[in-house]
Amino acid sequence: MDSANAINQWLDEHRITEVECLIPDMTGLARGKIVPRHKYNPAEGLRLPEAVLSMTVTGDYPDRDFTSVADPDMKLIPDASTLRPVPWNKEPTAQIIHDCYSFAGQAVDLAPRNVLKRILKLYEDKGWKAVIAPEMEFYLVEIQPDEDMPLRPPVGRTRRTEAGMQSFSIDAVNEYDDIFDVMYDWCEAQGLALDTLIHEMGTAQMEINLDHGDPLELADQVFLFKRTVREVAIRNNMYATFMAKPMQGQPGSAMHLHQSVVDADGRNIFSQADGNPSPAFLHFIGGLQRYLPAAMPFFAPYVNSYRRLSRYTSAPINLSWGYDNRTCGLRVPHSGPEARRVENRLAGVDVNPYLAMAASLACGYLGMREKIQPSDPLSGSAYEQPHQLPRHLDDAVDTLLRCKPLAELFGEHFVETYAAIKEAEYREYFDVISPWERRFLLLHV
């Protein structure tokens, strides 16, 4: 059965009345169209302006138009493997992620999902398959419509807010059982493979781990999980936020990426037959160390992202690596040879998951291709080491634009467009005068 017939059969069996046709934009949010079931033809796809992929997080556009002068449409083709119910809708509703193509049949190079596919093809051409497991941290916060007011932790079932930080507390998680029970049910209905739920360091900060697997499937799951948790939280009169640093004095929120690579027989190429680390393992780390600074805009995509990356806050300031060393930007957890992997701790949870996974795997790929040797593993605290990463978004964008190997892998058009989007966002942020400036500079300088 072809994919269009399979989609139609599923929609009929589930008595679907509406279809949410989704694409992930540059921020990782869902764009697309909601179509009545009787008007949805998966064999034909839909149309959407390509300019959607060059929007900033504020809904604006860079000064230069990076699409064709004709402002063309894209053709959206559904990926049947992503077909799922929307469990929170009253009417039977389906959601399905679409891929973006030109009408000549070429993959649109600005589509984040296509970017990840492009990097995974590099691995496939070598006879490899990348494996990823993401860990997502996020905060539950009180609803606050006034954007000038600081965020606060929400009230739990005891009608109180958390007292201090409750790392790994079971009782603190149970404060929000009504949210998490529904979250697990809705995720199960969508086939999202949740692994572990823990309470993180921050007040009402949680972490969800997903099972390891194919990077494209995992990026889809992160994309859908964020939608799901936001919806659950709103229905319980609070927000779930994936800002990298939503509250002053609290830890930031990361999306750690555990990465390994297997060959055609499923053997982990990071381990040799005798169980020791392989050259490919060390080269992968070497590639991350060399190229992650240039890829920083994919791991810290907003001005707020850089507030998270500071000493002594469980967030990296450099790219030292070590065995089971959480102060390092690159950590190698304890494991058997078959599960040897590298944890990239750089990304904030505010990333576009498709682009963050693509960037991390691209840097590791370059390391293996160029046989880059890493530094020696660090046994002490990486917080005592110097900063090695861009400290601000504008510096990070400049570094990305100077990196020809990443432009080769991602495509120059994509890198130039992404950089222009980030530059436009930074300019808009820079125009805002903050309360700190008014408080301390207005009458004192």
Image (cartoon, helix red, strand yellow):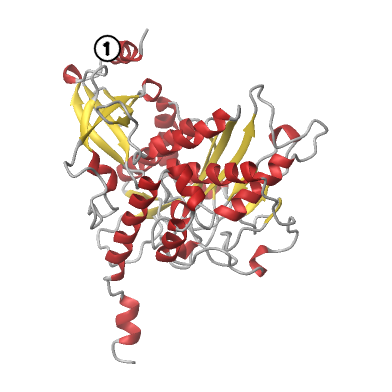
Can see residue 281?
Answer: yes
Q: Residue at x 75, y 59 (%)?
A: 379
The residue under label 1 is: 12
Residue 222 placement: quadrant? top left
Q: Residue at x 57, y 50 (%)?
A: 169
Can see residue 87?
Answer: no
Residue 60 appears at what percent x and percent y? 22, 54
- Camera-side residue: 41 or 134? 41
- Camera-side residue: 425 or 213? 425
Image quadrant containing the N terminus: top left
> Is residue 228 toward the left or the right of residue 328 in the image?
left
> Is residue 105 toward the left or the right of residue 291 in the image?
left
Dot 1: element: helix
Residue 18 appears at what percent x and percent y? 22, 24
- Camera-side residue: 52 or 10? 52
Residue 23 appears at what percent x and percent y? 31, 35
Image quadrant containing the C terminus: bottom left
Assess disc 1: are there few (<14), some (14-19) or many (≥20) residues with their C-alpha within 10 Å of its C-alpha: few
Amino acid type at mark 1: Asp
